[in-house]
């Protein structure tokens, strides 16, 4: 493995290193700005994809309505933010709205079709169509934007890059905090232990006396809530409009395929790769930025069919 | 589940012509004792008996349906012939490719519309369109062959990529591939002409017949659909199709029996890709144009809706689903608000998936089971969700 591994590192590492050196020498401000933008995008992708991968890992449920949860969370957050004037409340509202919606989906629908993977997926597709249309009905086709609170508004001066929007730095920090929190919850708490055990062997977990349905419901609520939270956070960084659900669904799909399904660390790595690739693609080869994402996916699949951090299960 | 199911799939498919007609309601398993008639000396006799069973398989309802679809354009208005009939059949052909792949190969691919759209793009690029700067202007038959061939290759490539993972992963990977191609077509102006795509991609005028006219075009689409339908029906009883169904039900056992599982799956993708490519060519001729919107995520999911709506257990399901879909698309406006079509189609899809996983064919089957109790439910052997 070591020889092949080394070969792979050389195969992909050398061109990337050459590119980095060239880009730094050519225009270091552009390079660093793109890098930071890539990190911001990666943070957003991680927030959306971590919920997706959690739900998939535990329940084998490919929730293709995950993008809709993102969008609904963003819209509800916008509504609350507009009426209370508080951005923090908006974030909470987005989280709660999506979490409740996800909980309802799990309790009313998916619970009754346990083990029927394909049917669950088809149901999520149907739900995503219906939810997208209801959202379009209620909120129309306009583009909404949030105003972040003043303490993260404006820009910060960083060494080498000059000015960079403070909010984007905040997004990165927040997602790191949430990621670490998620990891701590999974690795250190009792519930996290149950979730991890469920990912590895659902039947055994149920046999050891754990109420699996409750763990499922909780995980679904957390996963959905993260999507809603990402909706508000991402909506503030960019904007909300119909169609964003598809964009983030695709992003989390690719992130999870590359990173490995069911692994939060994998989601982080995948999000970093995809976010950076997308931003560098946009900056250096605008027409083909989507192709980079796709190439990463193909390469990951060709060498690691289960994703970079995926287990052989 | 696997052993009995696999055996049943093998048996019922091998002798389905016989059983489904002659011995309704008899358990299928006893057919395992049927002797293989191998020797070459018996070949003529075998061919004769085979063609006889094939003839016997044609029931009155087949004749009625055939007569109806042939007579349809002569009493329907051009709108119904073209907008409803031809469109439904072309969509049905793309749906059929998914039924073949999902129902018989156990691989639900969302990228069928992508393959169809790719064929359409290739036809526009190699053939002639309004955009003379990009279109190469080859004769239509050459462009057609190249487009369908390339699309089949692309489908095999998508298959090669997605068979590396299994089951539910397939749907995710094909979705990602499809959406990636959509964005590529939308952003690339040098080859795919970006947001606008290509227009004036017309069917040829041949032997003095303009295939753009509703009736002529309807018959072209009908011929392709019938060929596709009977082709799939034949293929699922051929050794390849039976091996494919075996792989659907238990890949490990088929591997142990010496079948190359990956090759069979990729071949299934290629076959389905060919069907989808033909459907895509028909659709670009129907629309007269191709743009990224034709193969967007909504269109990809529409194909899934069509296949699931009709039912994936039988090839006819795709066409039933397509007809219902196109009728809803055209007349849902009269029932509800013009803007709320997605709500209607999404709701119908949700209801079908929740309450009748086998689609409209499943409903029909349940109805028949309730009325006359002697109908065998094992047709098409096996379900798509295991």
Image (cartoon, coloured by chain):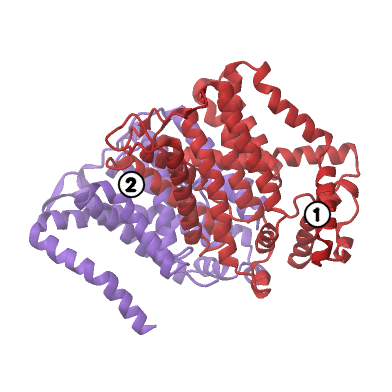
* A296 lies left or right of A189: left
Residue drawn at 76 percent across, 68 percent down: B3
| Marks 1 and 2 close (CB-CB < 8 Å) | no
- For label 1, the residue is B47
One can see residue B326 in this view: no
> At numbered mark 1, what does the secondary structure look like: helix, strand or loop?
helix
Crowding around mark 1 (Cα neighbors within 10 Å: few <14, some 14 to 19, many 20+) is: few
| Residue pointed to by mark 2 | A233
Which quadrant, please, contains the C terminus of chain B?
Answer: bottom right
The residue drawn where x is 48% and y is 69% is A189
Q: Which mark is residue A253?
A: none
Could you tell me if residue A204 is visible in this image?
Answer: yes
Quick one: B162 or A282, which is closer to the camera?
B162
Pair 1/2: label in front: 1
Question: Could you tell me residue B131's position as x and y percent?
Answer: 31, 32
Residue B263's quadrant in the figure?
Answer: bottom right
Please report the residue visible at 63 percent of the width from the left and 58 percent of the height from the top: A213
Residue A234 in the image: above or below residue B285:
below
- How far, Cα to Cα, is label 1 from label 2? 69 Å
> Does B314 sit left or right of B330 as displayed?
right
Which chain is rendered red in the image? B
Q: Residue furthest bottom?
A: A2
Where residue B125 appears, as percent x and y from the top left, is 36, 39
Left or right of residue B278, residue A146 in this image = left
- Chain letter for mark 1: B
């Amino acid at each position: 493995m070591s020889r092949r591994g080394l070969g792979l590192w050389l195969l992909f590492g050398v061109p990337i290193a050459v590119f980095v050196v060239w880009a730094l020498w050519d225009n270091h401000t552009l390079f660093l700005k793109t890098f930071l933008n890539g990190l911001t995008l990666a943070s957003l992708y991680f927030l959306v994809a971590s919920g997706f991968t959690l739900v998939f890992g535990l329940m084998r449920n490919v929730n293709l309505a995950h993008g809709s949860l993102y969008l609904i969370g963003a819209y509800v957050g916008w509504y609350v933010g507009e009426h209370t004037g508080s951005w923090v409340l908006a974030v909470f509202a987005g989280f709660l709205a999506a979490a409740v919606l996800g909980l309802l989906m799990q309790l009313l629908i998916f619970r009754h079709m346990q083990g029927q993977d394909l049917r669950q997926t088809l149901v999520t597709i149907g739900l995503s169509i219906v939810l997208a249309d209801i959202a379009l009905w209620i909120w129309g086709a306009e583009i909404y934007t949030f105003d972040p609170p003043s303490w993260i508004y404006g820009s910060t001066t960083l060494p080498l890059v000059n000015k960079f929007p403070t909010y984007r730095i905040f997004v990165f920090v927040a997602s790191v905090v949430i990621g670490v929190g998620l990891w701590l919850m999974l690795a250190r708490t009792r519930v996290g232990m149950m979730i991890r055990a469920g990912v590895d062997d659902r039947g055994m977990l149920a046999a050891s006396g754990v109420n699996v349905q409750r763990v499922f419901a909780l995980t679904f609520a957390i996963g959905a809530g993260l999507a809603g939270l990402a909706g508000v956070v991402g909506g503030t960084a960019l904007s909300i409009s119909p169609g964003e659900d598809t964009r983030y669904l695709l992003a989390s799909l690719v992130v999870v395929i590359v990173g490995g399904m069911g692994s939060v660390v994998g989601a982080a790595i995948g999000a970093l790769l995809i976010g950076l690739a997308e931003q560098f693609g946009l900056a250096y080869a605008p027409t083909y930025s989507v192709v980079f994402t796709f190439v990463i996916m193909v390469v990951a699949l060709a060498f690691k069919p289960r994703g970079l951090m995926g287990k052989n299960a | 589940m696997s052993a009995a199911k696999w055996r049943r799939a093998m048996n019922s498919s091998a002798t389905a012509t016989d059983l489904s007609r002659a011995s309704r309601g008899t358990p299928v398993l006893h057919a395992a004792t049927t002797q293989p008639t191998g020797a070459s000396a018996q070949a003529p006799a075998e061919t004769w008996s085979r063609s006889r069973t094939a003839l016997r398989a044609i029931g009155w309802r087949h004749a009625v349906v055939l007569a109806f679809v042939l007579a349809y354009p002569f009493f329907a208005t051009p709108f119904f012939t073209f907008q409803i009939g031809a469109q439904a059949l072309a969509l049905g052909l793309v749906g059929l490719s998914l039924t073949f792949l999902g129902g018989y190969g156990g691989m639900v691919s969302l990228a069928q519309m992508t393959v169809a759209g790719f064929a359409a793009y290739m036809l526009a690029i190699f053939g002639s369109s309004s955009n003379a700067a990009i279109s190469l202007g080859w004769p239509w038959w050459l462009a057609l062959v190249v487009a369908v061939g390339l699309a089949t290759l692309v489908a095999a490539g998508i298959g090669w990529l997605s068979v590396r993972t299994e089951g539910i992963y397939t749907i995710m990977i094909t979705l990602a591939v499809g959406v990636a191609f959509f964005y590529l077509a939308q952003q690339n102006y040098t080859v795919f002409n970006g947001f606008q795509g290509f227009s004036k991609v017309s069917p040829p005028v041949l032997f003095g017949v303009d295939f753009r006219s509703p009736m002529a075009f309807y018959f072209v689409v009908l011929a392709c659909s019938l060929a596709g339908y009977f082709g799939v029906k034949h293929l699922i009883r051929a050794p390849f199709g039976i091996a494919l169904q075996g792989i659907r039900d238990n890949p490990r056992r088929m591997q142990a029996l010496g079948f190359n599982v990956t090759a069979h799956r990729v071949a299934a993708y290629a076959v389905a890709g060919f069907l989808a490519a033909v459907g895509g060519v028909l659709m670009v001729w129907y629309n007269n144009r191709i743009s990224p919107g034709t193969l967007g995520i909504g269109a990809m999911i529409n194909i899934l809706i069509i296949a699931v709506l009709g039912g994936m257990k039988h090839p006819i399901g795709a066409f039933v689903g397509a007809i219902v879909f196109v009728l809803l698309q055209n007349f849902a406006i009269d029932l509800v608000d013009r803007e709320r079509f997605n709500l209607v189609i999404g709701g119908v899809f949700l209801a079908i998936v929740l309450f009748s996983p086998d689609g409209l064919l499943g409903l029909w089957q349940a109805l028949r089971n309730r009325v006359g109790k002697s109908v065998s439910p094992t047709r098409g052997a096996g379900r798509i969700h295991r």
